[in-house]
Amino acid sequence: MNDLAAPLRRAAPALLGYAAVRALGLVVLAVWSAARGKSAHTLLTARWDALWYTRVADLGYGYEVRLPNGDVHSNLAFFPLLPWLERFMHAVSPLSYADGGLVVSVLASLAAAWGIFAVVELVHGRRNQEGREARPWKGGGGRRVGVCAVLLWAVLPVGIVQSMAYSESLFTALAAWSLYAVLTGRWPAAGVLALFAGLTRPVGLAVVAAVWVAGIASFVRDRSTAPAPGARVWPRALGMALAPLGAAGYVLWVGHRTDKGPLGYLDVQAGWRNGFDGGAAFARFVGEKFTSFPSALAGVGLIVGVALVLWLYVVGVRQGQPLPLLVYTGVVTALALCASSYFGSKPRLLMPAFPLLLPLALALARLRTSRSAWVVGGVAVASAVYGAFWLNGSGPP
């Protein structure tokens, strides 16, 4: 317990700040929903993907919807870890599957916030120790940047999804802690966490890629330099072997169940008109916005948003983010921006790419505490209002 208490105390400011932001978002959502005669609880637990997850938890796989245009929406598109946890919560408590999913999401969001803090504190703590940061900041170095990164993740415009019965919080928690394990040389733990991330969302491939690239890079370093005394190869090899088993296992199981072989999961995704086309469909979607003046403003906003994401990634490269973070963020970003459908979901799909926030967190950490508090507070209010408006309207598909 003592080994856990010290890191938890270090992360406490980040976790308390995160909880406060999310509580604000839920209060605003409750008030907004009540004013519109809607149930905030229903919006959080029983709409869009949340319904598909609870149906898997209750009835298992095999449910599908055939649309008039011939598309087939199968629940095989949804990875199993969240439904498994919903079923577990239902079995050991009086909670419904939907409420079990909500509890899992809330707990996972806190674990994600802690994981983000741990990764950022480690990265920027090392930068200070190595003398790579020319302008130190007051208030605890890497710890201060870690707190800022967590708060920025909390106040994302679509941050309300972190409090929904969705899989984003669960995936981000597993991804963040897997990356932390890689950065600290805990290879078997990194592999196990990557395995579970691969059972959570298709983008679990990003975590697998980070583990594999980091492992290969470490093997290359060992060949070019004398390995440290006592260095062992098998933990890295074990971690790399474990990492892809979750995603690969589920994809192969879907192929077996559909009798379509290893690529059967791609057919399932095609039924949802979802796939990877290099961003061509998204580019056409943005281009169509410029056919009229009101929608052209949305088109400009989309272009600015994509440019910001790419700029933050480039800044992260220039600031020397560790290779596992760059690989992970690059794959998450590519899969989110280059998917061929559900364009309104792209901000939500980018949410796990938390290393994109590191340049902003570093800039925020350099401000005086009072000024950074005003910035975060103002953005938190705006995010809470937008989240309530969004969830009561079109919401996350």
Image (cartoon, rainbow, N blue to C red):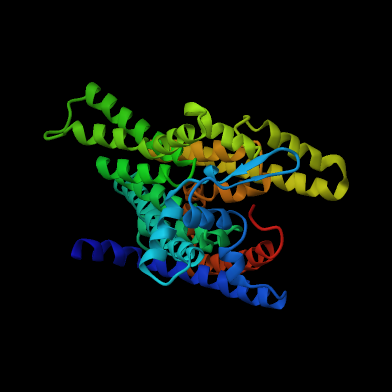
Q: Using residue 74 as the reference point, say whether residue 219 is left or right of it.
A: left
**Residue visible at 41% across and 57% down?**
85
Near-viewer residue (8 or 320): 8
The residue furthest right is 292
What is the x, y in percent for residue 330?
A: 50, 37
* Position of residue 328 measured from the top left corner of the image (x, y, whole percent): 44, 39
The total of numbered circles placed on residues is 0
Describe residue 344's horizontal placement relative to residue 213 as left or right: right
Residue at (55% x, 37% y) in the render: 335
In this view, 240 is above or below 143: above
Nearest to the observer: residue 283 or residue 372 = 283
Q: Is residue 89 above or below residue 348?
A: below
Foreground residue among 198 and 9 = 198
User: Is 282 on the left or on the right of 103, as rendered?
Assistant: right
87 relative to 3 in the view: left or right: right
In x, y percent, where is residue 175? 40, 47
Residue 29 visible, this angle: yes
Toward the left, the furthest residue is: 230
Q: Quadrant of the N terminus?
A: bottom left
Above or below, 247 relative to 277: below
Q: Position of residue 60 (x, y in %)?
A: 48, 51
Who's the residue at 70% across and 42% down the image? 303
Q: Residue at x 62, y 44 (%)?
A: 308
Q: Quadrant of residue 115?
A: bottom left
> Residue 166: in sight, yes or no?
no
